[in-house]
Structures are given as structure tokens and as C-alpha cells.
Image (spheres, rainbow, N blue to C red):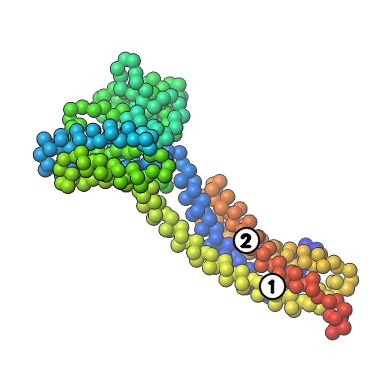
Amino acid sequence: MIKYLFVFLWNSRKKFTGILLEQALVFIVLMVCLTSLFDMLRQYKEPGLLDTENVALFGFMVPRQMDPAKRREVNLAMNAGIRNLRQWDYVESVSESHSLVPYLREPEYYASDSVTLFGRKFEAHSKVADQDAQSVFDIRMERGKWLEALPNGSLPVVITRQLADLTGNTDDELIGAQMLDDRNQTYTITGIVPGIKEDVFTVPSPGIITQLVYTSDDEYRIYREICARVRPGHMEEFCDASYREFKRLVPYFDEMEFIIRDMGVFKEKAMFPVTSRLKLLVIPTLFLLTFAFIGTLGLLMLNVKKRVQEFGIHRAIGATRRKLMGMMILQSLILTLLASVPGIVLSLFIFNVTFTHLAAIIATLLIMLLFSLISSYYPAHQITQINPAAVLHQE
């Protein structure tokens, strides 16, 4: 049957040129769309994306010209408010950090540092966090422990997998090793995390997380980033209650910028440029698929009408309805496979051959075959309704 179909398609190639060109175009557009989608999913799944679901950001920024005595009052009042928040039933944990909270700025504007490990210097994103940051952002450890207190008084540091791989040392060699920052401060590595991403679709950079140590200078800070993990379903209640609490406690509240917001808002904003670009691809692709379906269905129906006598003869000499229906569907699938060849060849030149792109090509081909199967089903069903006696009588 397959040989017969190939001979038939070759002899009728002019009639099916429209379907081939139409499906080839659909295949290419769909492949580009799915490749973008799969790339986006791959980037999203890169290790290091902090869990910000049910996490709220609250903090403040005071004018630089504010009197230091007033700044001290503000910070002490903030500390009192944070202690109160920790007692609330629906607050699971509260953490303060610097340059750890994602989505607040472009990745290049996060703090970086030059660190020395095993006598070699590396550039790394520098983050500061307290013990509670691990529970607030659900940070999983690959090796070691999160900012573990050290008996010798040395300051702990956690490094990312990306920095660990740059050193070329094994994990056992890294855990417990000494590290120097660009101020010659000595740290001891206590753990390794998969990565820390500042944005949803970025690749995690080499980084370090040092422990937040409070000093008397911290009472005069003009900017603070604090996050709280709240129980599911209590986010709106937490934001309203914490705003009232800080407004009650913090002096000069109206003179500074104060923010309390669900981190989900920041994540959606960070994702918008990529998701909107994907939507711009998806919408025309769906329209193109719809019009291609209508066009293919119409051409196949016309083809059935022109071949009524041929199918009638097939039925008269013993071909079953199922066989004729299968022949029509197989013909459509072969057309789709032939139309997909230019798109597959083109993709090998446009994209790097990676697992993501191969998966996108396979997914595109499967969708096109399903598209072909659906569009050919009704014309194939019409063949089974042909009465061979009536057809031969007309002949």
C-alpha cells in the first residue's frame, strides 16, 4: 500500500503542492514557537530559583539626608516590629538579607565580589543572609550545612555549585576550606547550594552567601530587605496587618518609602518580557494551525470527490472500508512527513543540536501528525460511505 501511495502522490504532486507548502510553513512556525517554549522551560528549571511562593517582601528606604538620629529610631522600631511579626500564628519565618532577594533589580546590579580560594581569584555574586533565609526561601543544600556556626569563631560562607565547579576542587576539599574576600576577611566554607538566581530565566552565576552580622552601624541603615514566609491563604491578611504594625511603631513613617508586597508580584513582572514574547508567537501560530486545518480538510475533501470512481473500484474488488479509510489517513500522514523535511533540515542550521531543540522538533512533528490525523479523518470517513454499485453504474 505504501508503495502505491508514494507512486500516487508523485503522479499527483501538482495537486498536493498547496498542502505541502502550507504544512511546511506551519511546521517551521510551530517549531520556532515550541523551541522558544522549551528554552524558556529549560531556563526556568535551571537550579537556583528561590521559592518565593507565600513569601512577602517588606522593607523601607529613608532619604539620605535624614538625620542619623532619626535613622537610628527608624531601624530600632523596625527591629521591634520584626520581633512582633515572628510571634504571629500565620508567620512561619522572617529573614533579613542583602542582594539575596530575587527580581528586585537587573542581575548585573546585584553585588559582586572578588574571592580567593586555594590561591586563585574568582569573581562571584556576593550575598548576605541570616540563618532564617534558608527556611524563608526553601534553599536546599547539595553538600554541607547552611551558614553553620563554627566553634573557632570563623565566619561561615556558603558557595554555589557554579563557583565550586570553577575551582576544579572536589566537594570534600571545598567543605571546610578557607576563603578570602577582597577586604581580606577570612571565611570557612560550610556548604554548597545548587545556585542562586536573581531572575527567573537567567543562568545562575558563581556566588557566595555570607552570614549577616549586625553591628552598631546597622542602626543607621537607609535601606533594608526583609522577607517573611506566611502560611498559605494568609498573604493579604499579613500585608494589611504588618503595614498597620509598622505604621504604628515606626516614627517618621510618612517621610520614607515603605513597601509590603507579595513576592509573586515581582516574579510575574520579571517573567512578563519572556512570557509576552512567547504569547506573540503562540497566537499567530494557533491562527495558522486553524487556517491550515481548514485548508487541508478542504483539499482532502476535494481529492475524495475527484477519486470517487477509484475508491468505488477498490471497494468492488474487495477492499474493506477500514482499509480504504486507513489508506486515506496514511496518505495524509505521508504528506505531513514530507512537508516536515524542510523544517527539520532548516532547524539543524538555525539551532544548536541540543536535547531541548531535539525535543522541540519531535514535539512539533508529533503535533503535525496529530493535526494531519484529525484533518484527514472526516474525508477518510466519507470514503466508507461510497456505494460501489452506484459508482460502477455511473461508469
Q: Which residue is mark 1?
A: 300
Residue 186 screen position, x and y as percent: 29, 22
Q: Decide which of 236, 217 is in the foreground and name it.
A: 236
- Out of 84 and 62, give the one closest to the viewer: 84
Local crowd size for mark 1, using a 10 Å CA cut-off: few (<14), some (14–19), many (≥20): many
Q: Which circle marks residue 368 in the picture?
A: 2
Crowding around mark 2 (Cα neighbors within 10 Å: few <14, some 14 to 19, many 20+) is: many
Mark 1 lies on a secondary structure that is: helix
Residue drawn 36% across and 26% down?
147
Residue 18 percent coordinates (x, y): 62, 73
**Closest to the observer: 131 or 364?**
131
Residue 52 placement: quadrant = top left
Dot 2 amino acid type = Met
Q: Is residue 119 visible?
A: no
Judged left or right of residue 31, residue 50 is left
Which residue sits at x=81%, y=78%?
Answer: 309
User: Disc 2 and disc 1: Cα gap in Å?
Assistant: 16 Å
Question: On screen, 297 above or below 341?
Answer: below
Residue 312 in view here: yes
Q: Quadrant of the N terminus?
A: bottom right
Among numbered discs 2 and 1, the one appearing first in the sequence = 1
Q: In this rendering, is residue 197 above or below 361?
A: above
